[in-house]
Image (tube, rainbow, N blue to C red):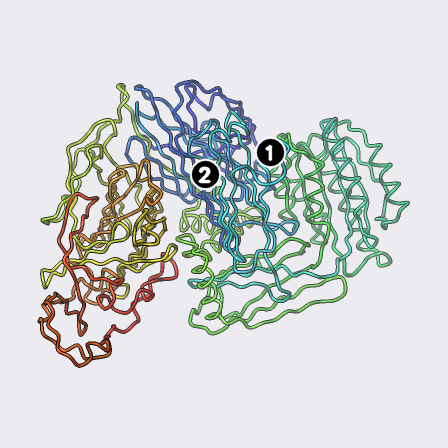
Amino acid sequence: MMLIVLVLYLCPVFQCQTEDTDFSEDVDFEEENMTSDMDSNAAPLRIPRQVKTLLTKETKPHIQELSVQTTIISRYAFTAVSCSMLNRHSAATQGVFQFHIPTAAYISNFTMIVGGRVFPSQVKAKEKKMKKEGGENNGKKKKDTPEQSEGEMEVFRMEVTIPGRNRAVFFLIYEELLQRRLGRYEHVTSVRPMQLVSKLSVGVTIVEHSRLTYLEVLPLRNGKTTASNGKVGPPVSTVVKQNETLCKISFTPNIVQQAKIATNGMLGEFVVRFDVERENGIGDIQVLDGHFVHYFAPRDLPVVPKNVVFVIDTSASMVGTKIRQTKEALFTILRELRPNDHFNFVTFSNRIRVWQPGKLVPVTPNNVRDAKKFIYMISPTGGTDINGGIQTGSALLSDYLSSKEESHHNSVSLIIFLTDGRPTVGVLQSPTIIGNTKAAVQEKFCLFTIGMGDDVDYRLLERMSLENCGTMRRIAEDADASVMLKGFYDEIGTPLLSDIRVEYSEDAVQYITQNLFTNYFNGSELIVAGKLTNRSADSLHIQVTASNSERSIVLEKDVSLHEREKETERRLAEAEAGPNADGYVERLWGYLSVKDGLKGRLRSQTSGERENFTQHATNLSLTYNFLTPLTQIIVEKPQVLADGTLKQTEAEATEAPPPPESSNQLSEDDNSFTPQSLHRNEPPKPISPVAKATSGVSKPAKKSVTLSKTSADGDPHFVVEIPHSKLTVCFNINGEPGHILRLVTDHKHSGVTVNGALIGAPAPVGSHKEQRTYFSSITIVANKPRRSYIEVTPQKVILDGRDRMILPCSSSISVETTNLGVVLIANTNLTVTIQGTIQFVILFHHYKNPAPYQRDHLGFYIANSKGLSKDTHGLLGQFLYEDIGLTQLPGNFSMAGENSTLETMGKNITLPSYPVLKVKDRTVAVIKKSRRIYSGKQTVDCWFAKNNAAKLIDGQYSDYVVSHLFDTGDWANGTNTH
């Protein structure tokens, strides 16, 4: 099979579509002004968006379902995208999956399922190639910059051939740390499937440690305008559920609602903004799994005066809309300058003009009026002398700061530089411009650069700003430059602190991310993360030093690490953050460390220094499976034969492993598929795996899946086989919707834990119950030899171990690792094998036309328990090694005792004998019943214990309710001896 490289295109569209022409033929690439040894042949690939709109044809695959689900845990966002498309035609056709991701985000997983076969990806370091070498690069380049701009997106793209009458499913996961701007965090989800989708869902879950103080769901945003049809507020079908620290938002428009927004499927961007409560002081510190993150955003501080020089491009290319919008923004900015600020303007084209030569002027009504006249008279003409503009502005500001009479000790100085092009006059070489800029600035002030449009050398602007303590911002060609310029100035226009240094106990931390910051602006946030060298340490000493307009500031505090970690764990458990919460602080640290490495690489002055930063960032990218400018994703591409079917391989002809022998077997449905195996070789290095499953075109012979009677299924009804006594016992648990029940726990020995979450439904008319409950989600956590888990719902299966995969229950797939095996039979069941000796089966129950009291749910069966220890507990686990006896109480016995009534007290009464179970020192009355299991395919006789299994189970019902689905706590209660 051919190895292909996933490509990221800078492109304004989201697509899951078909194309009959080669996409690369419709792309124009513009050579960037590269410095040093930038690898022009490497992938994966982010390129300037010069992509023409492609016409789709009637043969394109139909998108059946698109789901985009984001979980934001303390500003760190995990987004999982699932797109399912169907080729309805008999001939094979090309399907293209494209999705917008934020420029600052890193892809951490991509998997596709084509024709029932799984094709996972692998992140690898880019290979170094000489520029003169040949190679298959298709002219594509990835921008090598670590910074992001507001609203800027890139497009992840994957093209694959889908066999006739078959389905392709694409899974994409990316991660990002949200940046606070103007007192708000903003999360953007692109919703542009290019066609109407029958099942479209967008979800955003926000989990915070502090109270949410602000939450807003904006109208759909599409370029400059919104797609809200004049309506203000969230898009139609949006549902928001919120408490103090948790918020769940869903956007699920049906086809009619989608068509009212846009008939072509270009719905726009789903935008959520929020902020959290902050206390004055050292900030918020969160600790988890040997790592910490420190959020610092002080408030109620006096504003530091600023000295600002605006350096504006007035070359001929600025004529028209660009210069008009620039002038509008500058007029607004002038009105917002504060009385203690000083300012000046420099314009550059072929010639350099300074509004007030040799000085910066204070903010007075007359000076503001004269500045507006100067701006109004600007007329674009000539070329672009970037070096001359920067040198003039830097000299102007530097001379002002050197003036003893006018310099302000506690002030912030900066240059705001704006251009829409590349240098065409004066110095043209980027390395020379960068060197000249650094020499002119001399670390006396910061340089903030803004690029407008598609013709800008963004790499040059990035280097200029990064090497001079500033940032770079992009303004798209079709964006409202006036609004974006004003917004960018608002972010940096209110400095509150300067020269911020954040330090920690030297013997307690290592590998901390950036902890020196030139400025802190109002509405922003400083974030530092690191590793703890001594996890058993009691406390962490934190010191923050900074300067404001009045004095130097020193903040110090000793933070209890144990208390902070317990608090972090408690908050996550209360919010039911799910699998993404596991290790999020460490992944946040890895994310920031990679960003720091890329910045250091750009700022490096020697090849040796650059190589050190490159190696460090590459190693971290591989550790956390991040697709960065230094790594690439490789995925094996399916081959389709001339007849439209997938090419057969030897691996496809092999049979799936036979099930363990048992007298109880469940035959699969006729329309199920026979899965093949996906083998993963974990240590020492990951090897690109190949996943196989038979095509959905053929209808294989029925396979049998081994099950036992020990199960929790239905309402839920529990059935347990008692091996030593050869008895079958059953009971019901009348749980509460939302409760999570511990089914199996052997955490200390085998490392296995199974939990199930309940959902509710109204009881049928005439039922003696008030409500029904079912298992809506089941998690299996295996902590040995390394942590992995499986989360199952009626719609999908999430596997997270060395790699993370999200699989639809409508597919037939087999996955095998060193310690874990999973066999998924489409819409029927899931078999999980752990360490070869523990096996669980989960049944899927779906209703086409459910009654009010019915819900799609799961059933849980223990097929093989040999690997579980004798200390196993849980509602089912406690009976695996229990010795329970069945006996009959005699007809004549004394009723005297605490439960006697006045009529029977002390009397001998003759009653018919009845059966009881002897469980430890407890006696449990039972009756004979029949239960239907395996989706009604088998009936078993069992001894039924009433009253919510009172006295049958150890403890009480509440002892089996856990805090969250991934709770692995051991059974800590005594036995019930009543």
Q: Quadrant of the N terminus?
A: top left
Q: Residue furthest right?
A: 366
Label 2 crowd bin: few (<14), some (14–19), many (20+), radius 10 Å: some
| 603 is higher (above) or lower (below) than 143 | below
Viewer-closest of 768 and 157: 768
Residue 227, quarter of picture:
top right
Residue 573, quarter of picture:
bottom left
Q: Position of residue 804 (x, y in %)?
A: 36, 46
Give the labeled residue for mark 2: 201
Q: Judge whether residue 774 can be spotted in this image.
A: yes
C-alpha span from label 2 to label 1: 18 Å
| 939 is higher (above) or lower (below) than 120 | below
Q: Amino acid at mark 2?
A: Ser
| 12 is higher (above) or lower (below) than 508 | above
Q: Quadrant of the C terminus?
A: bottom left
Q: Position of residue 468 (x, y in %)?
A: 66, 49
* N-term-proximal mark, 2 vs 1: 2
Kindly state the secondary structure of the residue where label 2 is placed: strand
